[in-house]
Amino acid sequence: MSIPLITTSRWDVEDGHTLEGYLRTGGYEGLRRAIEMTPDQVHEEVKKASLLGRGGAGFPAGIKWGFLPPDVWPRYLVVNGDESEPGTYKDRLLIERDPHQLIEGCVITCFALGLSQCFLYVRGEMAHGQERVAAALNEAYDHGYVGKNILGTELSVDVVLHWGAGAYIVGEETALIESLEGNRGMPRLKPPFFPASIGLYGKPTIVNNVETLSNIPWIIEHGGDAFAKIGAEQSTGTRIFAVSGHVQNPGVFEVEFGTTTFRDLIMGEQYAGGIRDGNSIKAFIPGGASAPWFFEEHLDIPLEKTVVDNEGSMLGSGAIVVMDETTDIVKACHNVVRFFSRESCGKCTPCREGTNWLEKILDRILNGYGRPEDIDLLLDVCDNISPGISWPPKQTTICPLGPSAVSPIASALKRYRSEFDAYIGSNTVTPVSVDGGSS
Amino acid sequence: MSRLNEENLRVARQIISLYPKKKSALIPLLHLSQEQNGMVTNEAMAHIAELVEVTPAEVLGTCSFYEMFKRHPVGEYQINICHGISCHLLGAEDVLEHAEKSLGVKEGEITKDGKFSFEGVECIAACTEAPCLQVNYRYVNKVDSGEFDQLITDLQSEQKAEIPKHGALAKTRQQIQSEKLAGPAEVENASPPVWLQRNEDGQ
């Protein structure tokens, strides 16, 4: 079945990142269409498209947009380009290879919702991406696609490129807003107030992911109904997945959302081409490091949000990391936990202390100093961060970073407990307790 | 001299003018000062505090949260070796080990000639090119020991013109001519944007 490429159509066009290349391949047609409509009509098309947010949580964009309170001004648009989830690798390519598409999506969104200014937050480490966006914005300003009186209309919006400076947590939308205000990137407590009502500078703010906004020009040009016809009923359109790890051809692929399966992507000749060296698959992460792991029996699950949710994991940020039979599961688990431990912002105690403990315990297990009771201790710490260790996770923290560190441990222990036991071996040293009680 | 120089001060003022609140320019200005000095100094933070009208302590508070701001010297070429999960699966630890041997310094130290320093970093979003690294935030994909050594040789003989010295990020900046600027959306401005009138007019 052939489907149109919606977001990656210019990735192979050599000058697709320039205004000339963009216009030659149908660029800014969505914006031209939009400014012939009313803002409400544009919003309506996005609702019809049932576009799910592509950042991680998968919340419908059109509905998120509808949460803006009436009559509170100004309203802001913040673009989340702080892509840092391990294994995730799509926003950077959208930013580098098709920056005008993203800019067009931003301007259309501002038009639809009456957003007076847009901040495009690009992860600090993406120097090349920043150059591409800056160059594209300069061209777009020069030719009247952004800025004052866009295409000769009353629409006037600035899109400001903002550089991040290296912090995974800033991908959380309220932390992103804090960072944009010049603060440490620590998430804000919510509910009751989500950014749509109280966001940047305390004003209503829409925070959307780069891939989400890159879909908007196509939706407005071709209509929300055309978009909704692609993919599954509740997971419409296409999605970009990055497949990495132990596969023959690691790559980034735009596929039909909701109908393609993990097996298609991982094993398919036109995609990742199967496990390297003819090995067998041991485990795979279906949606970025935060997601609970899947195993061989999950390969035939379609890439559909609700199905994957019900199976006990998530599509998250579209990052599939494959581990073959040679993988040391304890090391892999330690690697992912170390990530969350290092990236914890330190605001909530269970996460700040807990992720650190988890890393240290795994560290000593790997170094041959593991104790038999360490497995229970790991699970106990996990339970303090995410009570019940269930899916979807409960949390004792403000944001989901803490519970994310629980995912790899719960997954690895569920299937490969024996590998942990093998590291621990017959060590019988009891932990030294500082408070005199038992640990 | 680690306050912003005249040219950078001009750039700084331009950056500040794009935001409804000055403090939002804090991180971009820290990048600017790091570009000028290769690191962020106390004097630079004090200067930024003046420019965005906060205390130097607040600037330090923000600065110290973010990985990319170095408040101590690093090599002219800071090599960030990815050890995220995808790179880990494909041998990131070997690259780190090799870097230590090849450069003769430990993670976080600087080579005697001041040219190189390296560290293991979290995922840098090039997972299909694992194991990968960045030199001053420019990507080098699918590295093995041989390529690592070649990279060091090339950098030593300044054969990598596309990689700037540490501190400089993007070579292209956003430049908006004043007549094209819509202007920042001031927080106190409580009126709806004019184009929403179309909803009332039905076109």
Image (cartoon, rainbow, N blue to C red):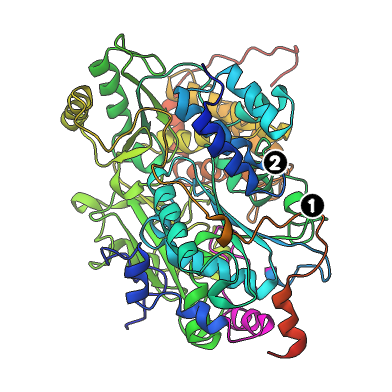
Which chain does tag 2 point to?
B
Mark 1 = which residue? A202
Q: Residue at x 45, y 46 (%)?
A: B173
Mark 2 = which residue? B22
- Magenta part of the chain: A35-64
Label 1 CA crowd tier, 10 Å (few <14, some 14–19, many 20+): few
Q: Is residue A360 above or below residue A221?
A: above
State the residue lying farthest toward the bottom: B202
Q: Residue at x 59, y 26 (%)?
A: A373
Q: Secondary structure at mark 2?
A: helix
Label 2 CA crowd tier, 10 Å (few <14, some 14–19, many 20+): some
**Nearer-the-camera pick, B91 or B142:** B142
Q: Residue at x 74, y 25 (%)?
A: B55
Q: Point out residue B78 in the picture as x, y percentages from the top left corner.
A: 37, 26
* Alpha-carbon span between mark 1 and mark 2: 15 Å
Q: Is residue A430 above or below residue A94?
A: above
Give the left or right position of residue A405, taking residue A230 as reference. Answer: right
**Nearer-the-camera pick, B83 or B17:** B17
Q: Secondary structure at mark 1?
A: helix
